[in-house]
Amino acid sequence: MKIPKCILLVFLLTITARIVAQEKVLNLNKPEREEWFSKLGFGMFIHWSVDVQLGMVISHSMVGASDDYLERYVNELPKTFDPKLFNAKEWAKAARLAGMEYVVFTTKHHNGFCMFDTETTDFSIMNTPYGKDITKQIVDAFREEGLAIGLYFSPDDFYFLYKHGTLISRDRKEAIASGNEPLNKYAKAQMKELMKNYGKIDIIFLDGREQYAKTELAKVCWEMDPNVVVTRGAIETPEQETPNKPLPSPWEANYTFGDQWQYRPTNENYKSANHAIVKLIEIRAKGGNFLLNFGPDELGRFPQEQKGGLNEISLWMFINKEAFHNTVPFKVTNESNIWFMRKPEENTVYAFIIEENWKFGERKNFNIKSLRANDGTKISVLGHNGLVLEYNPRVDPEPTVKNTQEGIEISVMRAHRIYNDRKWPNPIVVKLEHVDF
């Protein structure tokens, strides 16, 4: 039978439109809400699911797994998942102390295991020995600490594919929402539960392989709350990398604290707190948000390696948080090892000096070409009064600034005793008030 040309044309146009729609990123975030999001700056990412019990990569071991493996994964792991030591308030307080302004929690990763109370499936935290809604606990605890609430959700669902006899994969048509309408409806139903059952959700992070599914879910979120900010799925969210230069629109860099997103008890390599602090400085100076990932262990505890690193970040932020409060990127991101932020509507610039092997009581001079001093210029080191070097009453630790032919020269001493051995390795922040640029 010959197909009429008009019908064939409509069919081709529909397919073409579908392909274009899948490739195009839809962003209905309100500009003022994206501006609000960009001011948050620093957030805690939490990856956690039922397979943490085995210390494995979250979800991905299901791809290419044998039938026997999958049967044990979906039927046995939920029976032994009992994170009875989880304390959401501990995590929320630690995040706030570290200067974080928001959280993003993995409500459902690609494996399909729901860390929330859902009517769509029994493959959830509610059908484990623990039997309590983890997502609700996190939302309540972080909201109580004044942090913005973000939920991660993946439309990819390996459990759904397994239960429907579909080969678990990432790129085959039947494994993604655009080629599997039941999966599309299933994911939307779960997204509606999350947007409806946990109070106001500020941020949605949509993961997954295809843009079509993320766009469809983003539409659900914006329809239910036009003020929600969709990050991945609508804006740039580079993973484990930072752009070489500022992006023209809001963006968020996502990094693990170790090598793996979910907690791994062995064979793990954690970043130093200094590394994370320097990364935060670079990302903020380039106008981005820094979403740093942590992960509870199988009992819900804060692993000591993660807790210790976060504590060091907290200490640094206790001293220097002012430099991130109501500040924006400067006209240049950095000059060599000195990075900048400024206070809008004020001639105040914060200079983050990243200098290795800077000894306690040692004075160093730095040249900055982008600034000029005037009669009203003031210089200070955040956290220190510039008057005392402990046990050295004859030493003057006061910072100074003077003009040069090319800009200014600042003279700064590392004079604040932070550690017992005086070996504090992290950046110093210099505040320059009433400076010209």
Image (tube, rainbow, N blue to C red):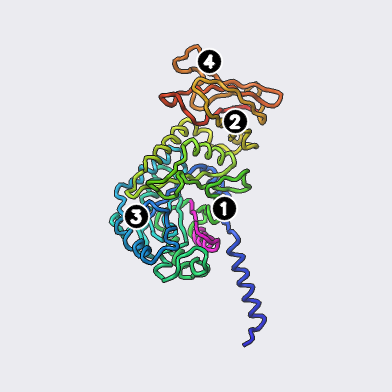
Magenta span main SS: helix
For disc 1, the marked residue is 235
Label located before the other in sequence (2 or 1): 1
**Helix, strand or loop for disc 1:** loop
For disc 4, the marked residue is 396
Q: Quadrant of residue 310?
A: top left
Classify 245 as above or below 232.
above
Classify 31 as above or below 69.
above
**Helix, strand or loop for disc 4:** loop
- Circles 1 and 3, Cβ within 8 Å, touching? The answer is no
Number of residues whose C-alpha sits closer than 10 Å to that of mark 2, classed few (under 14), some (14–19) or many (20 or more): many
Label located before the other in sequence (2 or 3): 3
- Circles 4 and 1, Cβ within 8 Å, touching? The answer is no
Q: Quadrant of residue 342?
A: top right
Label located before the other in sequence (1 or 3): 3
Label located before the other in sequence (4 or 3): 3
Q: Position of residue 14 (x, y in %)?
A: 61, 72
Q: Which residues are magenta?
A: 203-222
For disc 2, the marked residue is 348
- Circles 2 and 3, Cβ within 8 Å, touching? The answer is no
Q: Position of residue 359 (x, y in %)?
A: 50, 23
Q: Amino acid at mark 4?
A: Asp
Residue at left offset 53%, top offset 15%: 396
Q: In the image, which is nearer the foreground, mark 2 or mark 3? A: 3
For disc 3, the marked residue is 133
Residue at left offset 62%, top offset 88%: 1
Q: Within the magenta stretch, is there residue 372?
A: no
Q: Amino acid at mark 2?
A: Thr
Residue with the most extreme right position:
405
Q: Amino acid at mark 1?
A: Ile
Separation of marks 4 and 3 at Cα, in angstroms: 57 Å
Separation of marks 2 and 3 at Cα, in angstroms: 46 Å
